[in-house]
């Protein structure tokens, strides 16, 4: 039986069904029991198998076409003309790979640091993984929205159950913020449905829309995606959620969930409401630059490592939105594609780097139970291997050439130069600010004298941590040194996207 | 349908026989409901049949609503059994009154004239008043029953008054003749008729519990014993929907523009007040009461559209709401133990540590009611929003989703208590196998219909579209 044409469904449902199975296997209420051990093996098997299958998607992906690939289309809700409609193109495939790559790492990282109710913890991550892949491959508005919202539930539980002290506040804030953002997107979808009679995203792209309609729809989309990205000034849930979430939750939140916002802009906003996007492009660029400069400065002042990385995430995601909305400020077509490509590469790279940094903080937190920068100092003396990894990721976060962080940032800065000199000046400040806050943190945490007894007693990475950070380091360097395959994968799709976004619907 | 009356008589007879072996009554009731359901399925016809000289109608709408009513009443009885046993309330009256209430509900569902409607309504209401006061030793139950009775009597009076005006002007009690009269002589479509209409709408609003005629609802939910609250939260909602659709659509469909405004005011107020006030509740039954008011806002907004799509959306919403409400109250009942009424939200604390499966099911109900996909509540809301947008009211659609966000807060608070707080009580929930099974079925149905809503949507469209 040939299952290749069902590969996307398998990628979505394998983790979801696997997660449900994990719930039934359970853990006997004891993280050390043999049952819990076999449960964890099952989780790892499912997540690794999902990754292997997604590599298959990558290997048989046709980079020469902008059409959707591995398309599946079944009737789902005939009364509303809703289809179970899946497919990937150059902008969703890399994000799916990122998702399937990060999940096993999170599983390994949480292997024995999760003591309470591990079965529910791992089940939540597996179900979340399936839903995230669903968001990236859904081509029908209702299906997209279902996946998009359903994702909130496992994340809500992950932060709320396994989070830190103020976890309840953080998780309720996370849930309500994102829920409020997305419901208006639903209204926009239904409005487009009443116009076109279908929820097919491609029909939305073809639908003729007036300027007022486009502006309103853009705002509805903007609220949903800006909260997710998050853009200044609706970013305030993120530091709270990140700080309180367990390490795995922070990693997935930073690596994948934030990417949904960026993905939404390129998948929905730009092609469906091109004129609306053009109208608001100036505002978007302004908000992105504020995120880069202002949030960068905020990051500089953080005392809590997780908070610092959270603010750094907001600043870096500002770069992504900047790249997307430079489109109309650039005259030549080449530069427009460059901005979007840069934004996409930046999304993938930020997923790897921020995930890695949160894992690093998690490694320290597991040992000392503190996230405060002031509680550390001289970690390099006791944990040399860990220190070299963390320095590498910090350098990548600061955009050092040779790491993945450089590629996307460089592309976006070039594109903004083509658009406007001052955009480029402000955008380039991320290189300075990013280096400042990241390296300052490194200086205080990693280098210097051994600060206290806790640090003196630190043990270096164990095997699992070594594997996780090693794989991430390899990925960061791979994308940094050889971004060709990633860019090739996206280029045709992005050219088509530029064309879609460039034509007026009026 | 007449079968049900027969079964009630059988049951009444049984009361005199059974003494302390009331389990017989219980199983007999379930059997009666089963037979009723089966006969409904067997006699269901595609065509519309009018019976009893035009005062009674059997159509697809009535089949769907009746079958659901029988189903939820049976499920409610199943949930209630252990609870009643433990609280020494295991009496035949509960079942007899419940069955009479069901009879009233079914008469309303099939009513084709104003008088039949009123007859059904009173049968239902009187059973409900008695059910609320069913625990004789409880002062709060007696108080809420009194409140319910007095306010209910006023509402019934208002409805009857409105009916008399409509009858006086159109010269008929049957819905299709009323519609005919308005169509043939447009000059009667004037203030006097609207006056009657306004009183009818007051009656409808009261039965639904729409703001500002909602005052009884939270008090009754709180004061009544949990199984009774479950009953009030389910079957009468179906009856109220039938009341609305039959009178406003079948009978006074041509006055759509007149009643549209009134329904909108009721719906918007219900949406806002129901959802906002629910946040402040610490009693779960009361919270579910206010949440019911919020949901009524959605149902009324669907009716408000005045389109086939809107009516179908209202039907879909009511059917799915009833399933979710039954499950939520089922959980409240399950949580109560001997001599202890689980009423406070804090009783749900740490349920995940005590009984993960039940906590999981409650999570289904809460996210379902909140309208988070993939649970079915999402599609119910989607359906209504779609109908409202189609009718050309984007502002109302935005209001609805904002109300849904407000509502999400108090539903996820229950989830938060169950999952994030540690338990004060360690005992694992005790439930008989059949209760456990039905509750799981109920919870999984909320998910399964959400994953595969197509057939139910099509059914609702076909019935009313």
Image (cartoon, rainbow, N blue to C red):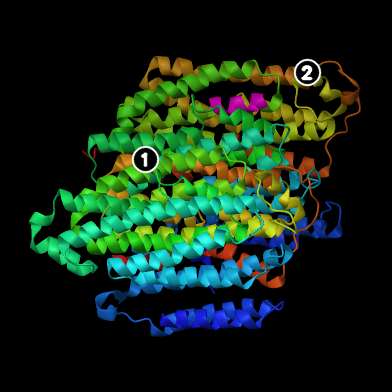
Residue A301 occupies which quadrant of the picture? top right
Residue B228, numbered label: none
For label 2, count other residues whose C-alpha is less than 10 Å away and answer few (under 14), some (14-19) or many (20+).
some
Q: How many marks?
A: 2
The residue at 27%/55% (across/down) is B162
What is the x, y in percent for residue A294?
Answer: 53, 17
The foreground one among A491 and A449 is A449
Rounded to the nearest whole Å, what is the CA distance between mark 1 and mark 2? 47 Å
Mark 1 Cα-neighbour bin, 10 Å: few <14, some 14–19, many ≥20: some
Residue at disc 1, secondary structure: helix
Residue A379 visible somewhere in the drawing: yes
Q: Which residue is mark 1?
A: B398
Residue at numbered disc 2 = A374
Q: Which residues are magenta?
A: A307-315
Whether residue A313 appears in magenta in the rendering, the answer is yes
For the stretch drawn in magenta, the main secondary structure is helix
With B338 as the anchor, is B152 left or right in this view? left
Q: Position of residue A250 (x, y in %)?
A: 66, 37
């Amino acid at each position: 039986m040939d299952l290749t044409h069902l590969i996307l469904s398998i990628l979505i449902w394998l983790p979801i069904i696997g997660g449900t199975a994990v719930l039934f296997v359970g853990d006997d209420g004891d993280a050390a029991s043999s049952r819990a051990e076999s449960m964890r093996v099952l989780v790892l098997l499912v997540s690794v198998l999902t990754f292997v299958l997604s590599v298959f998607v990558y290997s048989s992906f046709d980079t020469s076409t902008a059409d959707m690939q591995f398309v599946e289309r079944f009737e789902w809700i005939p009364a509303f003309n809703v289809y179970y409609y899946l497919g990937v193109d150059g902008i969703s495939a890399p994000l799916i790979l990122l998702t399937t790559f990060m999940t096993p790492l999170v599983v390994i990282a949480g292997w024995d640091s999760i003591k309470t109710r591990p079965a529910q913890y791992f089940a939540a991550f597996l179900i979340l993984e399936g839903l995230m892949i669903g968001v990236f491959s859904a081509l029908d508005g209702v299906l997209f929205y279902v996946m998009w919202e359903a994702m909130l539930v496992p994340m809500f539980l992950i932060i709320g159950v396994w989070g830190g002290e103020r976890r309840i506040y953080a998780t309720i804030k996370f849930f309500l913020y994102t829920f409020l953002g997305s419901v208006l997107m639903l209204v926009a979808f239904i409005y487009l449905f009443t116009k076109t009679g279908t929820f097919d995203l491609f029909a939305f792209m073809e639908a003729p829309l007036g300027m007022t309609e486009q502006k309103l729809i853009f705002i509805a989309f903007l609220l949903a995606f800006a909260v997710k990205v998050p853009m200044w000034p609706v970013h305030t849930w993120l530091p709270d959620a990140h700080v309180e979430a367990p390490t795995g939750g922070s990693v997935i939140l930073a690596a994948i969930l934030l990417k949904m916002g960026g993905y939404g802009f390129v998948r929905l906003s730009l092609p469906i409401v091109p004129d609306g996007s053009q109208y608001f492009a100036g505002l978007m660029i302004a908000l992105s630059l504020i995120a880069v400069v202002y949030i960068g400065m905020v990051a500089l002042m953080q005392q809590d490592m997780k908070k610092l990385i959270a603010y750094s995430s907001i600043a870096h995601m500002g770069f992504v939105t900047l790249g997307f909305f430079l489109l109309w400020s650039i005259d030549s077509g080449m530069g427009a594609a460059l901005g979007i490509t840069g934004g996409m590469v930046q999304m993938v790279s930020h997923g790897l780097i921020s995930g890695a940094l949160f894992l690093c903080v998690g490694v320290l937190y597991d040992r000392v139970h503190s996230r405060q920068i002031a509680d550390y100092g001289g970690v390099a003396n006791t944990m040399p291997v860990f220190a070299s990894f963390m320095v590498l990721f910090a350098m990548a976060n600061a955009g050092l050439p040779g790491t993945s962080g450089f590629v996307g940032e460089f592309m976006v800065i070039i594109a903004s130069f083509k658009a406007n000199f001052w955009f480029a000046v402000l955008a380039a400040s991320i290189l300075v600010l990013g280096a400042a806050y990241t390296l300052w943190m490194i200086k205080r945490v990693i280098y210097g004298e051994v600060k206290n007894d806790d640090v003196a007693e630190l043990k270096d990475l164990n095997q699992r941590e070594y594997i996780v950070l090693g794989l991430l380091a390899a990925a960061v360097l791979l994308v940094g040194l050889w971004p060709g395959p990633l860019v090739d994968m996206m280029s045709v799709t992005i050219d088509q996207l530029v064309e879609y976004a460039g034509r007026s619907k009026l | 349908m007449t079968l049900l009356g027969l079964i009630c008589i059988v049951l009444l007879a049984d009361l005199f026989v059974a003494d302390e072996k009331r389990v017989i009554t219980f199983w007999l009731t379930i059997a009666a409901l089963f037979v009723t359901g089966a006969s409904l399925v067997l006699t269901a016809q595609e065509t519309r049949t009018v019976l009893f000289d035009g005062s009674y109608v059997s159509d697809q709408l009535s089949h769907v609503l009746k079958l659901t009513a029988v189903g939820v009443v049976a499920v409610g009885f199943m949930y209630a059994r252990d609870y009643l046993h433990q609280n020494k309330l295991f009496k035949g009256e509960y079942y007899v009154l419940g069955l009479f209430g069901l009879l009233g509900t079914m008469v309303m569902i099939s009513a084709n004239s104003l008088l039949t409607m009123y007859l059904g309504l009173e049968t239902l209401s009187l059973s409900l008043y008695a059910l609320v006061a069913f625990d004789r030793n409880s002062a709060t139950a007696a108080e809420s029953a009194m409140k319910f009775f007095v306010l209910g009597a006023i509402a019934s009076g208002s409805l009857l008054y409105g009916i008399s005006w409509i009858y006086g002007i159109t010269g008929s009690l049957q819905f299709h003749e009323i519609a005919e009269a308005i169509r043939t002589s447009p000059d009667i479509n004037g203030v006097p008729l609207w006056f009657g209409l306004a009183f009818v709408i007051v009656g409808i609003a009261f039965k639904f519990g729409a703001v500002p005629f909602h005052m009884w609802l939270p008090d009754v939910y709180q004061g009544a014993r949990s199984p009774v609250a479950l009953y009030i939260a389910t079957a009468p909602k179906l009856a109220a929907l039938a009341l609305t659709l039959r009178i406003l659509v079948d009978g006074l469909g041509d006055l759509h523009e007149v009643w549209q405004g009134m329904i909108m005011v009721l719906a918007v107020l219900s949406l806002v007040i129901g959802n906002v006030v629910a946040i402040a509740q610490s009693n779960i039954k009361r919270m579910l009461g206010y949440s019911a008011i919020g949901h009524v806002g959605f149902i009324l907004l669907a009716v408000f559209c005045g389109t086939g799509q809107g009516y179908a959306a209202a039907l879909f919403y009511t059917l799915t709401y009833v399933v979710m409400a039954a499950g939520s109250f089922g959980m409240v009942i399950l949580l109560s133990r001997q001599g202890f009424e689980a009423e406070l939200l804090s009783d749900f604390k740490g349920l995940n540590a005590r009984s993960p499966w039940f906590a999981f099911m409650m999570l289904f109900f809460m996210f379902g009611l909140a309208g988070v996909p993939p649970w079915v509540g999402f599609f119910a809301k989607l359906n209504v929003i779609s109908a409202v947008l189609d009718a050309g009211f984007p502002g109302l659609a935005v209001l609805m989703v904002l109300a849904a966000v407000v509502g999400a807060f108090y539903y996820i608070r229950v989830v938060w208590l169950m999952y994030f707080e540690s338990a004060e009580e360690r005992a694992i929930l005790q439930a008989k196998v059949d209760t456990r099974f039905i509750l799981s079925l109920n919870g999984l149905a909320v998910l399964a219909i959400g994953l595969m809503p197509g057939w139910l949507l099509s059914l609702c469209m076909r019935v009313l579209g």
